[in-house]
Image (spheres, rainbow, N blue to C red):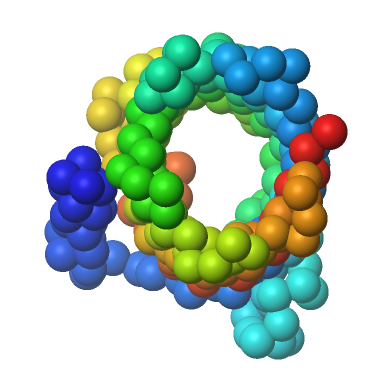
Amino acid sequence: MKRLFLLFLAGLWPFFSQAQHEHYPHLTLWSRMQIVKEPNPRWNLVGTFFWRRQNNYQENRSNPTINPLMIGGQTLITHRNTQNTVWVHIAQISYMVSNQLLGKPDDYNAPIGKEIRYAGGLEFNQEVNEKLTLRQRFLQELRFFKANDFHPVGRIRGRATIRYQLKPFVSINGVTELLFHDPPVLSGQKPIRFHQFWLGGSLIWSLGERVNLETGYTFIHGRRSTVIEFDEQNVLNLHLSIEI
């Protein structure tokens, strides 16, 4: 719980230090479908398909499905210790095709981005009781963008989540996440630089013994890569998970 609180406080700092710069609001829809396989209690394999859309501030600010935002896929291999308290994320590999968030006229002319991403790290799992679970995850990413000739760019991310089972068929989930650019970085950029702060909540519905549906909301405050401008995403989440 202490890690969750400290991460939340650290994420609030950019709001006070960067308030004088340009900020662009967005309404987006993030959806995904996950296929999960556990060969045994110590190994977890996940395949994910992403599909994200966004509003168009010139045409309809209230519809988050008008313009494309991102489409992609991901695989994740995780090993857990015997006590199920430490998860080692050995390899998280993603491929994504992304559109620029639309906040100003120049954004409509931005090229479509293509990215290959590798991430690895640790996650700490604390089952406080039969209903309450706390988790803290730390990942180091290497991102390879076509626009950067697929040279690696680093990013570190720390996430804390709290989950409480309200009923046998539904749980409430809270999340906060902080992301920083770290070496290797783009030419001319600082070695450590703020990128994003996330804060959100969701309900996780059990639709069956092996099927879960997550519905929720996440606020994301993020700095743009090459200019001191900021995007604020109001994200509607819709995620389906199937265990095979």
* 42 to 33, vertically: above or below: above
Place of residue 179 in the rendered image (x, y in percent of width and height, measured from the top left): 37, 40
Place of residue 239 in the rendered image (x, y in percent of width and height, measured from the top left): 70, 56
- Along the line of sight, the residue nearer the viewer: 120 or 142: 120
Image point (79%, 74%), residue name: 66
Q: Is residue 215 left or right of residue 209?
A: left
Indicate the quadrant where residue 124 lies. top left
Image point (45%, 13%), residue name: 81
> Which quadrant of the rendered structure holds the C terminus?
top right
- Along the line of sight, the residue nearer the viewer: 128 or 16: 128
Image point (58%, 15%), residue name: 42
Place of residue 216 in the rendered image (x, y in percent of width and height, measured from the top left): 57, 68
Place of residue 131 in the rendered image (x, y in percent of width and height, measured from the top left): 42, 54
Q: Is residue 143 left or right of residue 7?
A: right
- Along the line of sight, the residue nearer the viewer: 147 or 131: 131
* 74 to 128, vertically: above or below: above
Residue 237 visible in the current orientation: no
Q: Is residue 65 left or right of residue 168?
A: right
